[in-house]
Image (cartoon, coloured by chain):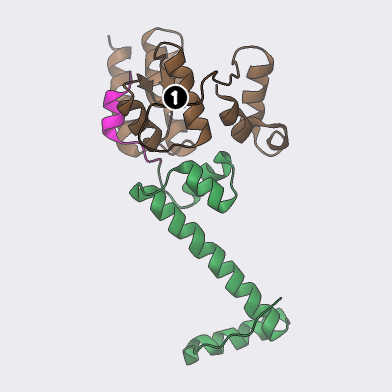
Chain colours: A brown, B green
Amino acid sequence: MPAAVFDKTASENLLDRFPDAAVIASRVEDGILKVSVPAEDRLPMPFAVHRGEKEALLLSLLGNRALLATDDGRAIKAVRFLRIPFIIAPKMVLRLAAQQLVFYSKARMSLEKLAKIGRYPPEIIAEALLSLLEVRDG
Amino acid sequence: MAKPTTFRIPEDLLTEIEKNIRDSRMERSVYLREVIRKGVQADKEERWLKKYSTGEADMMDVCREMNWVPWEFLDQLKTRNMHLNVSLEDWLDSE
């Protein structure tokens, strides 16, 4: 996780107000998530991105084009340009279900939360739910 | 420092304003300043969220302009029944 993204989403001043910020901070504290600052700061790209996106893109490039998780349309345009593989949250849920790391019911509930709270467009959630049914039914 | 300005408003709106001033028991100028400030803020939110939905701005642009953190941004999308700017194509291309 890029340091700039951690600062924006889970810095200390956010912990009391936003429960999800506290969850991220606790995962970092437990060592499940690692916060990193890329060693490079020049991105081979003709258009500008925000600091958090830039750090995420650099971390991926420095990690031999490691899979980048994002929920932002503009960041996805940048990863396409840089030919970095990416994943969005509903696809993560689907992959976890396919690998039987989460039960169908938990995966379904997560997709519903991504619709209501994560504000994913209905067409993506519909596709994800259909794919989840296919996973369940083999 | 507050600066004076003048503009014309329709009579029905003026009637409503006068009624609200009586109800709120506020000073006329204080009431008008407060209402204009709220209106300007609401208009700014609406314009930046529209820019987000049309792809002119991304989440961090909106957060910077509105002084929101990403969690507040998601709350605002929920309040307005809006969605992330991620497309079906992104779903299909995602690993």
- What SS does tag 1 mark? helix
**Quadrant in which the N terminus of chain A appears:** top right
Who's the residue at 41% across and 11% down the image? A64
Q: Nearer the viewer, residue A46 or B62?
A: A46
B78 shown above or below A109: below
Q: Nearer the viewer, residue B50 or B57?
A: B57
Is residue B41 shown in magenta? no
Q: Nearer the viewer, residue B87 or A107?
A: B87
The x, y position of residue B51, in whole percent, is 39, 53
Q: Is residue B24 left or right of residue B93?
A: right
A135 shown above or below B90: above
Q: Is residue B72 left or right of residue B91?
A: right
The x, y position of residue A32, in whole percent, is 60, 12
The x, y position of residue A7, in whole percent, is 63, 32
A32 shown above or below A125: above
Total residue callouts: 1
The numbered mark 1 sits on a residue in which chain? A
The x, y position of residue A23, in whole percent, is 63, 25
Occupied quadrant, residue A33: top right
Q: Which residues are magenta?
A: B84-95
Occupied quadrant, residue B47: bottom left
Mark 1 belongs to which amino acid? Answer: Leu
Q: Is residue A99 left or right of residue A59?
A: left
Occupied quadrant, residue A10: top right
Q: Is residue A25 left or right of residue B87?
A: right
Is residue B92 shown in magenta? yes
The residue identified by callout 1 is A57
The answer to whether one can see residue B11 in this image is yes
The answer to whether one can see residue A105 in this image is no
Q: Nearer the viewer, residue A87 or A109?
A: A87
